[in-house]
Amino acid sequence: MSTKEKFIETIENGYSLKDDSILFGTAIFNGEPIPNLHIKMPLSTINRHGLIAGATGTGKTKTVQLFAEALSDKSIPVLLMDIKGDLSGIAAEGTVNPKIEERHQKIGVAYQPKKYPVEFLTLSEEKGVRLRATVSEFGPILISKILELNDVQSGLVSVLFKYCDDNNLPLLDLKDFKKILQYASNEGKSEIEKNYGNFSTTSLGTILRKVIELEQQGADKFFGERSFDVEDLLRLDENGNGVISVLRLVDLQSRPKLFSTFMLCLLAEIYQTFPEQGDKPEPKLVIVIDEAHLIFNEANKALLEQIETIIKLIRSKGVGIYFCTQNPQDVPASVLSQLGLKIQHALRAFTAQDRKMIKLTAENYPLSEFYKTDELLTSLGIGEAAITALNEKGIPTPLAATLLCAPRSRMDILTAEELNETISKSKLADKYNEIIDRESAYEILSQKLERAYQQSTNEISKEVPQVKFPQQTRQTSRRTEKSTAEKIADSPLAKQVGRTLVRELARGIFGILLGGKRR
């Protein structure tokens, strides 16, 4: 048996899947694709997560597009994180050209253009369905991890959440959270300490500064109502295709903390909401995270541990998570070890450090008698990748250099007009784009402070007698008025009112400067 025949036999045995599967392409041997030697992945192992990696310009985005299309065809909904803004073309039909026809002849399958059902989502001012969550839904533990608080500060956040629960003060958005921090630092300190124990106003100030930092990254647009229902990610269209939800994040590259905050919230919400799936023949939802380094590089240790824990557990809910990044080392080893599918596009070795990284990456793949993996990773062309997946029994398939299929949808972005037309047909926009600002902690505490101020003013008015001076003693009256004003100013009640008024004015000024505009 020749080496080529042995290679064909190995691939056929490794990828002879009985379960329903998705097709990636055909195997390559000695630089030449072998028609109909198809590289596939069973639907039953898609919830084991995966990695799509490779240098810039090697075809990662098109592989993400191909993967999402194949899942949609199998009635599996997909959520794509579109960091670069180049995935919108999935909503439009692709076009046939000689290069695509030649590629598919080598693969052994016909190319049929198709457009897919797409829902555009946004966290910011980008066009699309607005995603939001309330501060209460995050809870004190998650909020503390996001803000990188120490144990003392985290305990204080838990106390404030408990106080708000006990006193019917809804924490919906960041202005509610800031208001309770300000209230606890001043007027409400004695009240809260009486029932929940002493605390430091210095810690409250630190927490407030961290909240403002998060707010300046745009989190004020994310926290609030109406909260997004993760069940809306599980829709099918009228033809039974899974809806591909594209989360447009083009303007969040410079705000990684907001992105990682959203991702943690989304994964936690899915884990808490979705029922246990067990071993089902196909996943319930697949999430593809482009530019995954934005999550892991910017996440603090506590946040990273939380993400890792959820990723390890969420597959039991029928959810698969796929990371797309340039360097596989961007993904922590503890997460990388959980990934069943690995699609590795070409890596470039320009420096000694690059070569070391490639050798290290090669060690993450199954040993192959047909490839020198480190050499293979530097010799792959555009639209080619080294692939290994899990078969139905959870056993890694043989490593295979693969000529990938071309996406059936448009391999380019939508025009502004096409994007607007697609969004105008959204079935979720009316539900989530309405701005809701019901009475919550901010309004309730503001009213409470206003009542206290009015009461204090009335008490001062009652304490000060109304004295009428004769016209002939004007000079004496001025001296008497001055003496009376000094008396009022020196009273403890007046000092408290003055401090309260100054604080409220300062908050209003800084709220404007910090962009804390009420919705």
Image: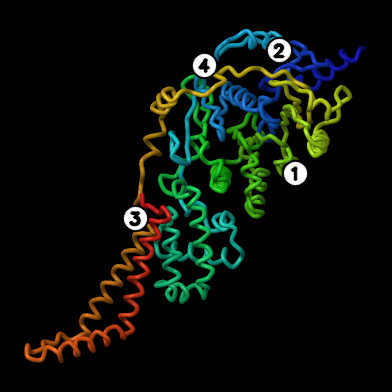
Mark 2 / mark 3, whichever is N-terminal: 2
Give the residue type at disc 4: Glu
Mark 3 / mark 4, whichever is N-terminal: 4
| Residue at 87% across, 22% down | 370
In this orientation, does residue 340 appear? yes
Mark 3: few/some/many CA within 10 Å (<14, 14-19, 20+): few
Give the residue type at disc 1: Ala
Mark 2 / mark 1, whichever is N-terminal: 2
Q: Which residue bears the numbered disc 4?
A: 93
- Label 1, label 3: how many angstroms apart (C-alpha)? 46 Å
Point out the frontmost of discs 2 and 3.
Answer: 2
- Tag 1–tag 3 contact (CB < 8 Å): no
Mark 4 / mark 2, whichever is N-terminal: 4
Give the residue type at disc 2: Ile
- Label 4, label 2: how many angstroms apart (C-alpha)? 21 Å
Q: Quick one: SS at disc 2? A: helix
Quarter holding the N terminus is: top right
Above-or-below relation of 399 to 357: above
Q: Nearer the viewer, residue 354 or 465?
A: 354
Mark on residue 107?
A: 2
Q: Which residue bears the numbered disc 1?
A: 333
Residue 95 percent coordinates (x, y) = 55, 12
Q: Which residue bears the numbered disc 3?
A: 439
- Tag 3–tag 4 contact (CB < 8 Å): no
Residue 92 percent coordinates (x, y) = 50, 19
Point out the frontmost of discs 1 and 3.
Answer: 1
Above-or-below relation of 482 to 436: below
Q: Residue 129 vs residue 396: left or right? A: left
Point out the frontmost of discs 3 and 4.
Answer: 4
- Tag 2–tag 3 contact (CB < 8 Å): no
- Tag 1–tag 4 contact (CB < 8 Å): no
